[in-house]
Amino acid sequence: MPDRLAPNSLLAKLDTQPRVRDFLARAVTSGRASHAYLFLGSPGSGKLDAAWALAQALLCGEDGISGACASCDDCGRVARRTHPDVHYFAPESATGYLIAQTRELLEDVALAPIRAKAKVYIVDRAEQLRANTANALLKTLEEPPAGVTFILLGSSADVMLPTIVSRCQCVPFRPLSLEDAATAVEHATGLPAGKCRMAVAVAGSPARAVEFLKSGDRQAARRAMVRAVDLLAHADEADILAAAKDLMGAIKAPLAEVKSTQQAVLEQNQDYLSRGALKQLEDRNKRELNARERSGIMEALASVRSLLRDALVRLASESEPVVNEDVPDVVERIAARATVTGVARALDAVSSAEARIARNVTPQLAIEVMLFDIRKALQCP
């Protein structure tokens, strides 16, 4: 790891992708960072974590520091994902990015930074850029204004528009095993290996797993989902509807702190920002809340998937370790009343819930349907 990176910076913490970490660190510390990157890799490989890490390094406000100091105000805001000059975009339609999203991005690119010396745009799931929206981005990607960096995230260059790929510096991410990711979380937190494996299974990447383990609300949402699935054997229709409502309340609980932080940022900036800039900041805050809620829902569904996979493990072997070591009794109860085929159908119900939410079905309704389908699949009465 390059010596000039502060050990507490997000970039320095990319232990699971050392080649990516060192490559980006050299680019930043040498002043040769590209204006557009394309991070390529499978889900859970840490692309989004690396994007925020690079954003922190680029926006660090400490004079004379090449890369993130991890202690200045800009570094802190990026670490909390509340910096107004880091713009995160994700598809807002089941079929991809909307033209309105691209138009908003391009309009914002022309504006000066709000707080930092530069601006960063993170475009998640860039393979969902349609031809018309991608074409609108091409010229800006090729020649963005000074101080603007684009970081696109995708699964494979093969499913991206060649014109987009050709305008970016591609950075490949190696797939991570659950054990590799859990080991990284264990090193970062000092917590038991079993708890770290569970966190990775729920959160999807080492950095998000570390944050998950720091959040009592997010862990409470996971426990609520595990409890809801455990009680399906004796739940009637009213119980399931009530459980889905309670789950959504638990999933939204962590958003209260985010809303409070956003409001504080708005109040700090409202005296010197134009009405248009304030409106853009409010729109960004709204997108951030939607993205965080969706992330919480995905964590809850990942909790179910992990629990059901543990049940499959237990059906196959009495001695194999499970991921959800803290709730072995729940795993045993599911395995005791289910078959391999039934658990497989229950897993299909989780995938169907994800697909419904991607198509903008109300999350609570998607969870209700999923719980009913899981109950039927596990042959609960």
Image: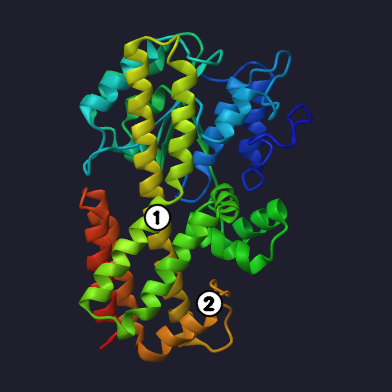
The foreground one among 188 and 329 is 329
Residue in the picture at 42% in, 73% down: 227
State left or right for residue 179 relative to residue 160.
Answer: right
Q: Which mark is residue 251?
A: 1
Q: Is residue 57 visible?
A: no
* 299 horizontally vs 3: left or right: left
Residue type (three-letter) at the residue carrying disc 1: Ile
Residue name at image x 28 percent, y 79 percent: 375
The local secondary structure at tag 2 comes to loop
Where residue 23 appears, as percent x and y from the top left, is: 64, 31
Q: Is residue 272 above or below residue 181?
A: above
List the single residue furthest toward the right. 3
Q: Quadrant of the C terminus?
A: bottom left
Of 48 and 258, the residue lying toward us = 258
Residue 193 lies, with reference to residue 320, above or below; the image says above
Which quadrant of the rendered structure holds the N terminus?
Answer: top right
The residue labelled by disc 2 is 327
Residue at left offset 37%, top offset 17% = 278
Q: Kindly tell me whether residue 353 is visible in this rendering.
A: yes
Give the image's coloring scheme: rainbow
